[in-house]
Amino acid sequence: MALIKKFRIKNLKGDDPIIELKNISVFYNKREIINNLNFKIYRQEILGMLGPNGVGKSTIFNLISGLKDPNYGEIIINGVNCTKLPIYERFTKFKLGLVPQYGGIIHDLTLIDNLKLVSEIHINKKEARKQKIEKLVGQFEFEPLLNIKSKHLSGGQKKKLVIAMALINDPKILLLDEPFAALDILTIKMLQEVILNLQSTEEITVVVCDHQARDLLNCVDRAMILSNGKIIALGSPNEVISNKIAKSHYFGEEFNIN
Ligand SMILES: Nc1ncnc2c1ncn2[C@@H]1O[C@H](COP(=O)(O)OP(=O)(O)OP(=O)(O)O)[C@@H](O)[C@H]1O
Ligand SMILES: [Mg+2]
């Protein structure tokens, strides 16, 4: 697939972090999962996270959203230390949107009722709710699926629904945990375009992880490669691909994005 990201946000080099993880360590049953992690996510950038199964990518999303407390370290969002801030406050105060790796929908509700439910929580005015849902239904081509119970949707359709639900509150920071998993080629392309569009028109910041390394690298400004609880490479897609340590621990010698 051709490189999608044809431009990089110019002001990325300016030091304007919207999220900062400082000296973060996480243990599960004395097993260290994340080892003194430090990184910044800049306003309006798309940051990709890559790394093998179990390296801690979902844990990082949980730390940012508040689903998991770190054993050590601080999480700063928009300059505010929110290490102790509960989940709901982070979501409302900083307008977070989360697409979890699994779940995220109510299986006994139809597709349209899942969208309506989330819109009722986030949007006060009836007309604005209607417009938002109509926009998402068109964008994600949900028309034929509106009245199907979510448990009967295919894996990819479920994933698309969760992504649409995460966009209802016009997030300023969008956390996408494996959004491309189970999606077909054209839907991945559509989603990449949605992400890039949100970045340029709504100025949102996106953090995304996925095992579809090519699809991910094609739409991010910077990528971070994790291995054994640490960052082993961080930079533009071309920089991380050519990084020797990232090659030997993650990409292998043959990998390219073209
Ligand atoms: N509640 C928990 N109790 C014990 N161990 C856990 C718990 N949650 C996560 N872990 C462990 O933490 C590590 C990191 O898990 P995490 O889900 O963050 O990995 P990941 O990088 O998202 O992996 P994948 O690519 O498979 O989704 C794994 O070894 C996992 O077994
Ligand atoms: Mg995961």
Image (cartoon, rainbow, N blue to C red):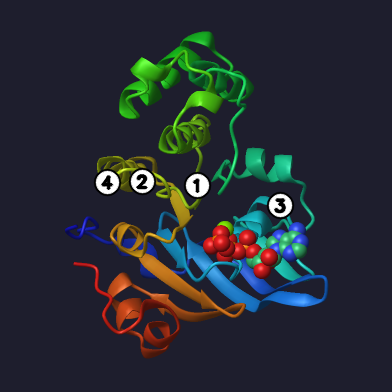
Q: Nearer the viewer, residue 165 or 45?
A: 165
Q: Nearer the viewer, mark 2 or mark 4?
A: 4
Specify whether residue 114 is in view.
Answer: yes
Calculate the distance from the C-alpha at mark 3 to the C-alpha at mark 4.
32 Å
Tell me the residue that label 3 is attached to: 66
Check if mark 3's residue and mark 1's residue have beta carbons within 8 Å: no
Q: Earlier in the sequence, mark 3 or mark 1?
A: 3
Tell me the residue that label 4 is attached to: 185
Q: Earlier in the sequence, mark 3 or mark 4?
A: 3
Q: Is residue 257 above or below residue 79?
A: below
Calculate the distance from the C-alpha at mark 2 to the C-alpha at mark 3.
23 Å
Q: Residues within 10 Å of mark 2 (few under 14, many from 20)?
A: some
Calculate the distance from the C-alpha at mark 4 to the C-alpha at mark 1.
22 Å
Q: Which residue lies at the image location 41% right of the left edge and 16% below the top edge?
A: 131
Calculate the distance from the C-alpha at mark 2 to the C-alpha at mark 1.
9 Å
Q: Residues within 10 Å of mark 4 (few under 14, many from 20)?
A: few
Q: Earlier in the sequence, mark 2 or mark 1?
A: 1
Tell me the residue that label 2 is attached to: 195
Specify whether residue 19 is in view.
Answer: no
Q: Earlier in the sequence, mark 2 or mark 3?
A: 3
* Quarter of the image where one finds residue 57: bottom right
Calculate the distance from the C-alpha at mark 2 to the C-alpha at mark 4.
15 Å
Tell me the residue that label 1 is attached to: 174
- Mark 1: which amino acid? Leu
Check if mark 2's residue and mark 1's residue have beta carbons within 8 Å: yes
